[in-house]
Image: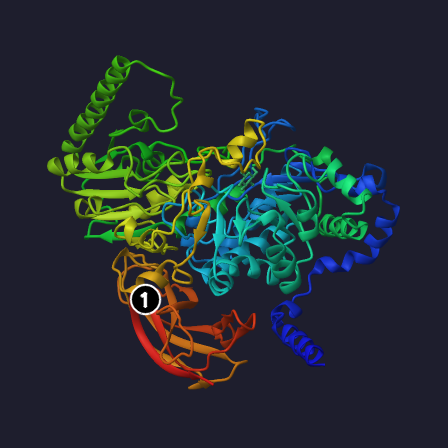
């Protein structure tokens, strides 16, 4: 009796806890179910199983007999990947597949603009359709947990709200234009080293509040049709067979009705993935081909499960607007409409970090500008491992400057440093000691020769424009950076340049933060211009010359030192034990899912694959703020060419109930002489909460563009339900009624105005 009562109570609790939001979300994909019933009846078991694995490297099968076409996938996330041979990674060498290179994830996030993210998605979908693709493998929306993360440049932000707003808008942009998204990499794929084996151990609250929101928002608000299961494990189970992530959270709690695709080579078993909610093993059929068929025939996997997995794929097929084969690949992929979107995003993404009255450039006396640095001429569309974009064109910073400056200045160039001299990405063969010594001497000579040339160039100039940072070899899929130092001797070079010409403007072409302890004091101005796409050089030049006022804001905190960042401070970043990357194994044609330990890690007591996220919710600024650790530049930071005055903070009420929306208003005045965007941010600080919270959390933001002398009132909405916490005991979103401070800020480090209100 008692047990019965208990189970009734648990059921009621679960009903209430099964997030009220998921009940609100009813995917448009469900409308096709009646029709699908009829299709399923006509399909043989073989035909069904045939849909659940790769047919080619980027295709999974349909059923020709029934007029169901194959599903065609394409990478994503920042441009449509070039065409490759159906069953290998060898490019076909076409010319028509040259696509628009869109600014990569961290650049898009630096715009803080859902409108631009929607445009971005629209542009990606249009180009995917020109190539006849059905599902875009993107957006990539994992939280930027560590500054060294190899794919930080692909991901959006360290903050769940900013990531969620952008992932939702990107998703809608893609799907409103007839293509399905595939949100990746679900979930907790926050590092590249050992990504094929790392096992994330994390508390429920941090998982629900920090890492899952970008996925949840894109599913619940964007109605995302596809999700890619990540390579790693969470709580001991591979993401491709993780019942908690796929069945319980994604499908049951959020109401996801679409299809889950494995990351390439990320499946390890037959029964568990299909039972847990994985629809397609990609590529190949090692686990979900014959073996799956056998498992159904042996009665281990019920045919009902197979029907459900096929149904989920068919829903997506019916929701998209496939392009007939004969209409695809007629035009070149990159089109002017999309190039314009790439330009608009790039213009709003560049972040001005420092400016001692030197920008915008004064060209009145036709100055000599020494452009120095390898990144001034390097393209960033391709590189590293994995997805890249073979662009139709990519305007480099040097070309952009020449385009925009013309003869208004004399531009001279020196490379200054080269990655060639540092042996990144080389194939090493066994060499004699003598050979090694000679090579090292040669390298040293080359480093000196390039630096000497740059010094001579700087000597002749009025201004030095140093264009450095990382590149696509340093920031890459498959491995994390070992540190955040400026690579290739850039610090030594900057020091030498400063000796002969102290007027240095430094532009970082990086997708993630660099250690700036040397570079910052040597620079009169500093900017980060990201891996900024096809039009990146033009956008940068427009900002340097003042055609446009900078308006990007950092989507992550910029640490003073790597050791200050949470996972490094706590020593819980676990790079694994030097195994070959899972994807590299796949390219070489070996078993990608090989999780045997090559270096005997099993003999070590602490499993090196375990990554304990012991910082919990204190990711990014939540950590620096709460622990009072200084940063180089705070989250949300960015300067411009004018100044703004904040005044008149107000709220529509003083006390708010659970279903209310807090309306915060504030007046922003442009007190300078040029037009520019301000990015108003609202954070919440809890005064007397009942559970622990980070010191403050972003809850709303808005771009506003007052003209010089003009004031504009901005109203920002904060639904009280967004202030709940994830209760690990009741497994539900729970209110924490308390007094809160509303902080209106220009960045996480610059709170302008405060107002206290009460949550009832
Ligand atoms: C990456 C995915 C990508 C896939 C196909 C994997 O290695 O992690 O992001 O979509 O390859 O190229």
Give percent across and percent down for residue 217. 56, 61
- Furthest toward the left, the residue is 499
Q: Give the camera-side residue of 549 and 52.
A: 52
Judged left or right of residue 507, residue 331 is: right
Judged left or right of residue 535, residue 50 is: right
State the SS at label 1: helix
Judged left or right of residue 215, residue 673 is: left
Query: Can residue 491 be seen in this snapshot?
Result: yes
For label 1, the crowd category at 10 Å Cα-Cα, with few meaning under 14, some 14 to 19 and many 20 or more, is: few
Q: Is residue 247 above or below residue 413?
A: below
Q: Is residue 5 above or below residue 373?
A: below
Give percent across and percent down for residue 83. 60, 31
Give percent across and percent down for residue 172. 59, 56
How many labels sit on residues? 1
Q: Give the camera-side residue of 700 and 297.
A: 297
Give percent across and percent down for residue 342. 47, 45
Q: Is residue 30 above or below residue 405?
A: below
Q: Residue at x 64, y 72 (%)?
A: 14
Q: Residue at x 57, y 34 (%)?
A: 592
Q: Quadrant of ligand 1?
A: top right
Q: Give the camera-side residue of 563 and 513.
A: 563
Q: Is mark 1 within 8 Å of ligand 1?
A: no
Q: Which residue matches tag 1?
A: 626
Q: Is residue 522 above or below residue 2?
A: above
Specify the quadrant of the image occupied by residue 47.
Answer: top right
Q: Residue at x 46, y 39 (%)?
A: 477
Query: Can residue 366 be seen in this snapshot?
Result: no
Judged left or right of residue 529, residue 72 is: right
């Amino acid at each position: 009796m008692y047990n019965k009562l208990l189970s009734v109570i648990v059921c009621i609790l679960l009903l209430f806890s099964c997030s009220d939001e998921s009940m609100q979300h009813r995917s448009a994909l469900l409308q096709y179910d009646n029709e699908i019933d009829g299709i399923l009846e006509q399909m043989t078991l073989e035909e069904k199983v045939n849909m659940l694995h790769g047919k080619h490297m980027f295709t999974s099968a349909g059923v020709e007999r029934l007029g169901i076409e194959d599903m065609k996938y394409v990478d994503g996330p920042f441009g449509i990947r070039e065409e490759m041979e159906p069953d290998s990674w060898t490019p076909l060498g076409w010319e028509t597949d040259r696509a628009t290179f869109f600014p990569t994830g961290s650049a898009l996030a630096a715009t803080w603009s859902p409108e631009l993210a929607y445009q971005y998605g629209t542009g990606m979908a249009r180009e995917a359709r020109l190539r006849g693709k059905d599902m875009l493998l993107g957006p990539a929306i994992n939280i930027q947990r560590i500054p060294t993360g190899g794919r930080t440049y692909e991901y959006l932000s360290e903050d769940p709200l900013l990531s969620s707003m952008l992932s939702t808008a990107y998703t809608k942009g893609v799907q409103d234009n007839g293509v399905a998204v595939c949100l990746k990499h679900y979930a907790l794929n926050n590092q590249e080293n050992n990504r094929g084996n790392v096992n994330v151990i994390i508390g429920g609250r941090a998982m629900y509040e920090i890492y899952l929101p970008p996925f949840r928002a894109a599913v619940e608000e964007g109605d995302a049709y596809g999700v890619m299961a990540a390579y790693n494990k969470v709580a001991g189970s591979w993401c491709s067979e993780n019942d908690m992530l796929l069945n319980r959270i994604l499908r049951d709690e959020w109401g996801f009705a679409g299809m889950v695709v494995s990351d390439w080579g990320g499946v390890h078993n037959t029964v568990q993935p299909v039972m847990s909610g994985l629809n397609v093993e990609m590529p190949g059929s090692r686990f979900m081909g014959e073996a799956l068929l056998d498992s159904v025939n042996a009665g281990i996997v019920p045919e009902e499960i197979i029907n459900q997995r096929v149904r989920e794929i068919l829903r997506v097929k019916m929701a998209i607007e496939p392009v007939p084969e004969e209409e695809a690949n007629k035009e070149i992929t990159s089109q002017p409409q999309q190039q314009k979107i790439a330009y608009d995003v790039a213009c709003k993404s560049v972040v001005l970090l420092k400016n001692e009255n030197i920008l915008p450039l004064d060209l009145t006396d036709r100055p000599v500008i020494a452009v120095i640095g390898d990144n001034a001429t390097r393209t960033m569309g391709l590189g590293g491992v994995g997805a890249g974009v073979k662009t139709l064109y990519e305007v480099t910073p040097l070309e952009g400057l020449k385009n925009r400056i013309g003869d208004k200045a004399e531009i001279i160039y020196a490379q200054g440093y080269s990655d060639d001299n540092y042996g990144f990405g080389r194939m090493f063969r066994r060499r004699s000691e003598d050979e090694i010594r000679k090579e090292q001497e040669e390298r040293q000579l080359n480093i000196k020769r390039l630096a000497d040339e740059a010094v001579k160039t700087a000597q002749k100039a009025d201004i030095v424009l140093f264009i450095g940072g990382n590149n696509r070899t340093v920031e890459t899929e498959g491995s994390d950076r070992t540190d955040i130092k400026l690579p290739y001797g850039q610090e030594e070079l900057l020091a030498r340049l400063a000796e002969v010409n102290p007027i240095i403007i430094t532009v970082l072409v990086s997708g993630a933060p660099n250690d700036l302890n040397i570079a910052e004091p040597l620079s009169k101005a500093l900017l980060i211009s990201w891996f900024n796409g096809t039009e990146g050089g033009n956008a940068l030049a427009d900002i340097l010359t003042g055609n446009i006022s900078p308006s990007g804001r950092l989507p992550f905190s910029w640490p003073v030192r790597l050791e200050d960042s949470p996972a490094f401070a706590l020593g819980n970043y676990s790079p694994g034990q030097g195994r070959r990357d899972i994807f590299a194994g796949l390219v070489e044609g070996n078993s990608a899912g090989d999780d045997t330990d090559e270096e005997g890690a099993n003999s070590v007591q602490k499993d090196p694959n375990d990554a304990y996220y012991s910082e919990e919710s204190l990711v990014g600024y939540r950590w620096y703020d709460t622990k009072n650790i200084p940063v180089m530049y705070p989250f949300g930071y960015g300067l411009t060419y004018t100044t703004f005055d904040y005044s008149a903070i107000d709220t529509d009420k003083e006390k708010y109930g659970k279903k209310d929306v807090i309306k915060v208003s504030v007046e922003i005045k442009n007190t300078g002489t040029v037009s520019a965007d301000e990015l108003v941010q609202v954070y919440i600080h809890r005064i007397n909460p009942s559970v622990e919270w980070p010191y403050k959390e972003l809850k709303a933001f808005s771009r506003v563009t007052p003209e010089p002398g003009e004031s504009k009132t901005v109203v920002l909405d904060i639904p009280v339900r967004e202030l709940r916490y994830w209760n690990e005991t009741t497994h539900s979103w729970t209110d924490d009624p308390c007094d809160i401070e509303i902080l209106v800020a220009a960045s996480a480090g610059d709170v302008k105005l405060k107002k206290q209100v009460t949550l009832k």
